[in-house]
Image (spheres, rainbow, N blue to C red):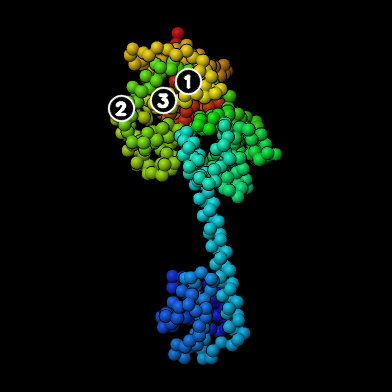
Amino acid sequence: MQRLVDWLGRQLSAEIALVDRASKVEASTSRLSPGVLADIQSVLTQLSSGQLAAAATQVGTLHVRCEALGRHAPRPVLVVVSSPLPLTRESLALASHVGALVEVSRRARQADSLALRYQQAAARLRLAVFMALMTGELTLARRMTAGAVPPLLDAERLRIHLLRCPPSDRGRLIDAYQDASGYHGRGLMVRCPVYDDHLICLLPREHDGGSANGGLAGPLRALVRDNQHYALGISAPVPLQNTARAYDQARHALAAARHTPGRVAEYHGQPPLAVLLPDQQAAAWARAFLEPIRSAPRLTLDITSLFLHFPRSGVAQLLGVSRNTVTAHLRRVQDALDLDLRDPHCRAELALALAITDLPLSDSKAGNAVAKRKPTPAPAATPSVDNLLSTEAAITWARAFLQPLLLSADRTVHQTLRAWIEAGTDAQRTARNLDISRTTVRAHLRTAEQLLKRSLLPPSPGTHELVHALHIVDRAP
């Protein structure tokens, strides 16, 4: 705007001002006197409100020509001040032409601004849908997209493809595959609000085979194949209400993918420990364990659940609260449950209780093991967690979980993992306790991720599983 105004001033040997819709000077030549605009304020008001399209007047010996720009009031006004003679016909035409260019430039900027705001709103909506699915709220996800329900919500099952890529690539990839509705065909691509190098892709199970039918799985694999800095973790197919489980699986698969030649890994893990425990005894223990926080506000429970999967700063970003608020809610939970949430054993126990109380009533294939279990009589007394983890199913699960470590030729990895858990998942303390370097500890953790096919980046469900597995095998015969 300033360049156009200055150029017009030189061409006409006049002083130029562009007055915006709020009656403020947006751009002007350097020698324009503010008093001139004050003297024609009433004329500017008439032009801006749409009562006049153009006007000519005099302020002392100065000739002033004003022209309203655009069609929607309030309108900006182009002011041309000349002396001692009024503008010629050719000068007036040039001023009008520049006014038209100013308006075109303004509309272009508005269009860019609107497009940016639309992209931001679409991204926020996609994230909201993802977060609703993460809490199993399918109805809420449909309500918040009323009139433009994403096709993903009509699918029975989905996979999550978790793409690790440079943060600057995420926006480009989302834009490349986004359709006019703001979604991604049958899928949904979401910037991870916690980890800057993660792109979360939710794909319906029946349409995740390639791009021929609108799927994104094929293009995602091709991106990893062609970019050595990319990696892809893929969950197993799960019902939509189990999106949180699929996300955890994709995180585990991504941890394994980083150490494979093709940098792509699918999740082929065991069933979660929670579904293998005796139904009624496990439910009784979990209810008793969580009873002190049963009446806590919903925000407290949401913060507690997310804290077991993300760092505190990530929880704050996900819920739009401050980190101090997250800490305050967690402190109340710690006091109510008499737990130290800095201790990985306490976090694992809390995660198990929440997983048991959140189990679906039925879950097709993944729930077949639950459905086949015979109902057991209600326990006379609340069992302890040690009793629950002493069952044959739990012992079998723990041994299978740790088997890759035990079969490894490098037994120091197993030793480092135990020391890491006992040190509260603090790599520096672990290094000091084992008298090795912190770099060696981190190398052993990466090896363990590759062997266990689990993400051990705390906080992580993989760390909770490791704690339980070590505890179970230590107490088993």
Mark 1 and mark 2 lie on one chain; the one further toward the N terminus is: 1
Q: Residue furthest top?
A: 477
Q: Amino acid at mark 3?
A: Thr
Q: Residue furthest front?
A: 147
For mark 2, what is the residue?
292
Q: Position of residue 283 (x, y in %)?
A: 39, 20
For mark 1, what is the residue?
275
Say if mark 3 contacts mark 2, CB within 8 Å.
Answer: no
Q: Residue at 48% across / 77% down in the picture? A: 51
Q: Is residue 263 above or below residue 116?
A: above
Q: Position of residue 90 (x, y in %)?
A: 62, 85
**Residue 19 appears in view:** no
For mark 3, what is the residue?
357
Mark 3 and mark 2 lie on one chain; the one further toward the N terminus is: 2
Q: Residues within 10 Å of mark 3 (few under 14, many from 20)?
A: some
Q: Residue at 56% across / 70% down in the picture? A: 103
